Amino acid sequence: MLKLYIAVPCYNEEEVLPDSAEKLRAKLNSMMTDGLITQDSRIVFIDDGSKDKTWQLITQLHESDSIFSGIKLSRNRGHQNALMCGLMTLRDEADAVISIDADLQDDIEVFDEMVRRCEDGCDVVYGVRSKRETDTFFKRFTAEGYYKLLDKMGAKVIFNHADFRLMSRRALRAFAEFRETNLFLRGMVPMVGYKSDIVTYERSERLAGESKYPLKKMLALAWEGITSLSTKPIKMITRLGLIIFLISLIMLIYTLIRYFTGATNTGWASLMVSIWAIGGLQMVAIGIIGEYIGKIYLEAKRRPRFIVEEYIHD
Ligand code: UDP
Ligand code: MG
């Protein structure tokens, strides 16, 4: 039997938390009676510096039932950091930790299957969405395109898997060795190795409240994914530079021919266009290199990824 912990990052989730907590408790209780998990399994909410009553609700839940624990971050650090905090705080307490979003869009009914696969010797069990019917066309198109792009960039990610997964204690201990500050967990977990498996499920709508991932945060996460997992963009710049250099050689020959045929004044338009185009490309190139240097800067500082203010548990 496994001692299972559920890690739930929460940011301003007062609307959905009571409902989610009840559903999770019912699920864990039934898994306990089925003899799948031990009686001291827990549901741990990680409050990511919420501004609403989220932490208050978590303390109330903890007082009402010791199945609930809470970790309070000292301030808002974002979903990936909050989740990392949960996994790292719990890694020595539980035999396995399942991470899931507070809105329970991911199907809690596959917990059983995850636990079974874990007992069969898998150290990581990924939750994978079978289809994306509840998503808008835009979201589906961009999300699936993004997974393919990541793959092209050489980053190993599980297609249509987000942050719903089970990790064993062994996997979590290995994961603790990953000390980077710029986190894109779904790209880092596969690097741990060990035996893994997937379970598929259908993702539903948010139970209540609004998405805590507005487009801006989503784009930031997408960018983080590419630049944290791959250095291909820098290589692409080098290649682009070479191509432009080759083009300039052709242009040189062309210009010389024009010069000797005595028609040098007509090139003004093409000259203007190239100046703007190359200027723009150079700025983009410097910008991308700057992004990586910025990351090196942050990594070099070795700042803590999260600071726990309070951990309430039994
Ligand atoms: N979240 C967090 N910190 C943040 C933003 C989000 O811990 O700064 C949590 C949030 O409470 C939720 C999860 O990350 O549990 C995913 O957010 P959400 O469901 O809003 O994202 P979506 O499903 O819309 O992509
Ligand atoms: Mg959600």
Image: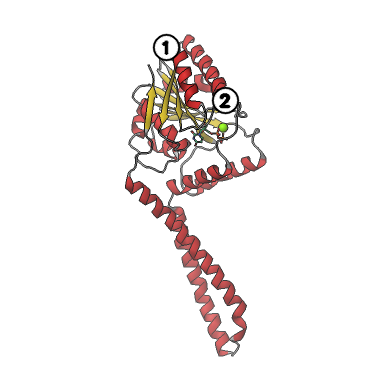
Judged by depth in the image, the label closer to the viewer, 1 or 2, is 2
- Pick out the residue farthest to the top: 33
State how the image is colored: secondary structure
Marks 2 and 1: in contact by CB < 8 Å? no
Figure quadrant of the N terminus: top left
Left/right placement of residue 165 relative to residue 173 reads: right
Label 2 Cα neighbours within 10 Å, binned few <14 / some 14-19 / many ≥20: some
Above or below residue 230? Residue 164 is above
Looking at the rendered structure, the kind of residue marked 2 is Val
Judging depth in this view, the residue of 153 and 309 nearest the camera is 309
Q: Nearer the viewer, residue 25 or 248?
A: 25
Q: Secondary structure at mark 1?
A: loop
Q: Position of residue 78 (x, y in %)?
A: 47, 38
Question: Disc 1 marks which amino acid?
Answer: Gln
Residue occupying image coordinates x 65% and y 33%? 134
Query: Mark 1 or mark 2, which has the lower sequence index?
Result: 2
Q: Residue at x 51, y 68 (%)?
A: 279
Q: Is residue 36 visible?
A: no
Q: CB of residue at label 2: within 8 Å of ligand 1?
A: no
Q: Which residue is mark 2?
A: 16
Whole-number angstrom distance, CA of label 1 to CA of label 2: 25 Å
Packing grade of label 1 (10 A; few <14, some 14-19, many >=20) is some
Compare residues 168 and 116 and report the one nearer the observer: 168
Residue 187, given in percent of the width and then of the height, sits at 45, 40
Q: Secondary structure at mark 2?
A: loop
Q: Quadrant of the C terminus?
A: top left
Mark number, residue 8? none
Q: Is residue 47 above or below residue 31?
A: below
Q: Residue at x 58, y 43 (%)?
A: 215
Provide residue 169's location: percent of width, then percent of height: 36, 26
Can the viewer see residue 112 in this picture? yes
Residue occupied by mark 1 = 39
